Every structure is written in structure tokens, then in C-alpha cells.
Image (tube, helix red, strand yellow):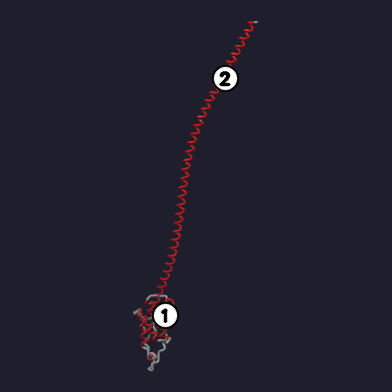
């Protein structure tokens, strides 16, 4: 009985020992497994930290690149605005110059028309002067008046270089020749109206302005050779 009891106690002790050994082994295995898991976790954590650092650096580089690009875009926009303002100013300047050119063209055209008109007038005046260079036929005694001192009744045809219908353009002419022609016309009108003194005065004034204007001299001689009413 004692022997059996001892065997049982010994077997129980062995079983307990085996249990504790197994338990220890299990704890050891779990400990090693946990240790390995911890190592792996730490490695993953370190890798994650490295990845985070790398991503942070890449993010910083991207932010710097974006800032540079934004600065470049702003500079381009400023340059664009400056070019737009310059283009606007140049366009306004060209518009003003175009208006000035158009104005000058209009003035030049008016001047050319005026020159052409004056050339036509001068040519016409020269032709009429050539046609009227010869004096009219000498007046006879009946034209000069009788011995009683009666005044002569003149007609326009008695005088030289009367420009019928040309007073309008002659009035606008400022040369000495035009003034002499106007005064000669005026003197002829006075003579036709019987105002010989005023006629002679106009002819004399025409000669004072242009002494080479022969029609005024011829007409003055015609007036002065006629006895005036006293």
C-alpha cells in the first residue's frame, strides 16, 4: 500500500513537473513569439518613420516647387499686365497718329485743291490779260464830249480788262495783281455810273499797288482825257 502510494505520488510529481515544464516551454515559446512580433513591429515602425520622413521631404520639395511655380506665374501675369498696358498705350498712340495723319491728309487735299483752283485762276487771268493787252480804239470827238463841257457817258465796253462775273474769286485773292484787278473793276463801275473822279481814284490806287498793271493805266488815261462837268 505504501509502495503504491509512493508510486502514485511519484507519478503525480512527474506529471506536475511535466506540466510545469510544458507550461514553462509554452510561456517561453509565447515570449519568443511576442519578442519576435515586437521586433517586427519595431522594424515596421522604424520603416514607417523613415517613410514618413521621406514623404515629408518630398512634400516639402513639392511645396517649394509649387511656391516657385506660383511666383513664376505671378511674374508672368505681371508681365502680361504690363504688356497689355503697353499695348493699350501703343494702340492709343497709333489711333492718335492715325487721326493726325487723316487730318493732315484732309488738309493736304484741301491745299492741293486750293493750289489747283489758284492755278486755274492764274491761267484764266493770264489768258484774259493777254486778250486785253491791246487798248480799245481811240475815242473820237463825239465820245470825248462837246465844247460845252458835257461829261461822257461810258459803257463797260469802253474800258480794258473788266472781269464780268469774276468778282467772287477775285475778292478772295490777296496778291497785288488781284487787288489791282479789283480796283480796276471798281473804277470801271464808277465810270459807267458817271462818277469819273472816283473812277480815276480807283485806277490810280490800282497803279500804286501794281504799277505794271497796264489796263488800269489805259483806263485812267481814258477817264482823264474826257472833260468833266463843272
Asked whether, in this view, residue 73 is left or right of residue 214, the answer is right
Q: Please determine whether, in this image, residue 118 is positioned above or below residue 74.
A: below
Which residue appears farthest toward the front when viewing the image?
A: 2
Local crowd size for mark 2, using a 10 Å CA cut-off: few (<14), some (14–19), many (≥20)? few
Q: Quadrant of residue 140?
A: bottom left
Give the residue at mark 2: 27
Where residue 1 appears, x then y in whole percent?
65, 5
Which residue is depicted at the point 43% across and 67% down?
107
Q: Quadrant of residue 208?
A: bottom left
Residues at marks 2 and 1, CA–CA distance in whole angstroms: 146 Å
**Nearest to N terminus: mark 2 or mark 1:** 2
Q: Quadrant of residue 185?
A: bottom left
Where residue 17 appears, x then y in whole percent?
59, 13
Which residue appears farthest toward the bottom when viewing the image?
A: 148
Q: Please determine whether, in this image, residue 127 is positioned above or below residue 144.
A: above
Which residue is depicted at the point 45% across and 62% down?
99
Asked which secondary structure carries label 1, the reply is loop
Q: Using the image, tell me which numbered label, if any, was put on residue 45.
A: none
Identify the image quadrant of the C terminus: bottom left
Q: Please determine whether, in this image, residue 215 is positioned above or below residue 90.
A: below
Where residue 90 appears, x then y in whole percent?
44, 56
Q: Are marks 2 and 1 in contact (CB under 8 Å)?
A: no
Give the residue at mark 1: 163
Label 2 vs label 1, nearer the camera: 2
Local crowd size for mark 1, using a 10 Å CA cut-off: few (<14), some (14–19), many (≥20)? some
Asked whether, in this view, residue 51 is left or right of residue 220, the answer is right
Asked whether, in this view, residue 230 is left or right of residue 50, the answer is left
Amino acid at each position: 500500500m505504501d509502495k503504491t502510494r509512493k508510486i502514485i505520488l511519484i507519478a503525480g510529481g512527474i506529471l506536475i513537473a511535466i506540466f510545469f515544464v510544458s507550461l514553462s516551454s509554452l510561456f517561453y515559446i509565447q515570449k519568443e513569439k511576442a519578442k519576435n512580433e515586437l521586433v517586427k513591429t519595431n522594424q515596421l515602425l522604424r520603416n514607417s518613420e523613415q517613410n514618413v520622413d521621406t514623404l515629408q521631404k518630398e512634400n516639402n520639395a513639392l511645396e517649394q516647387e509649387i511656391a516657385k511655380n506660383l511666383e513664376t506665374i505671378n511674374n508672368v501675369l505681371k508681365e502680361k499686365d504690363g504688356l497689355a498696358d503697353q499695348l493699350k498705350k501703343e494702340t492709343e498712340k497709333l489711333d492718335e497718329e492715325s487721326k493726325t495723319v487723316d487730318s493732315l491728309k484732309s488738309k493736304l487735299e484741301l491745299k492741293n485743291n486750293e493750289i489747283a483752283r489758284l492755278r486755274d485762276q492764274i491761267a484764266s487771268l493770264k489768258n484774259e490779260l493777254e486778250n486785253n493787252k491791246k487798248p480799245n480804239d481811240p475815242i473820237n470827238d463825239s465820245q470825248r464830249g462837246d465844247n460845252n463841257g458835257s461829261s461822257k457817258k461810258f459803257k463797260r465796253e469802253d474800258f480794258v480788262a473788266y472781269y464780268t462775273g469774276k468778282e467772287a474769286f477775285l475778292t478772295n485773292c490777296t496778291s497785288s495783281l488781284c487787288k489791282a484787278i479789283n480796283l480796276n473793276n471798281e473804277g470801271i463801275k464808277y465810270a459807267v455810273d458817271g462818277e469819273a473822279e472816283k473812277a480815276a481814284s480807283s485806277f490810280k490806287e490800282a497803279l500804286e499797288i501794281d504799277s505794271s498793271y497796264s489796263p488800269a493805266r489805259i483806263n485812267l488815261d481814258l477817264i482823264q482825257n474826257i472833260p468833266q462837268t463843272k
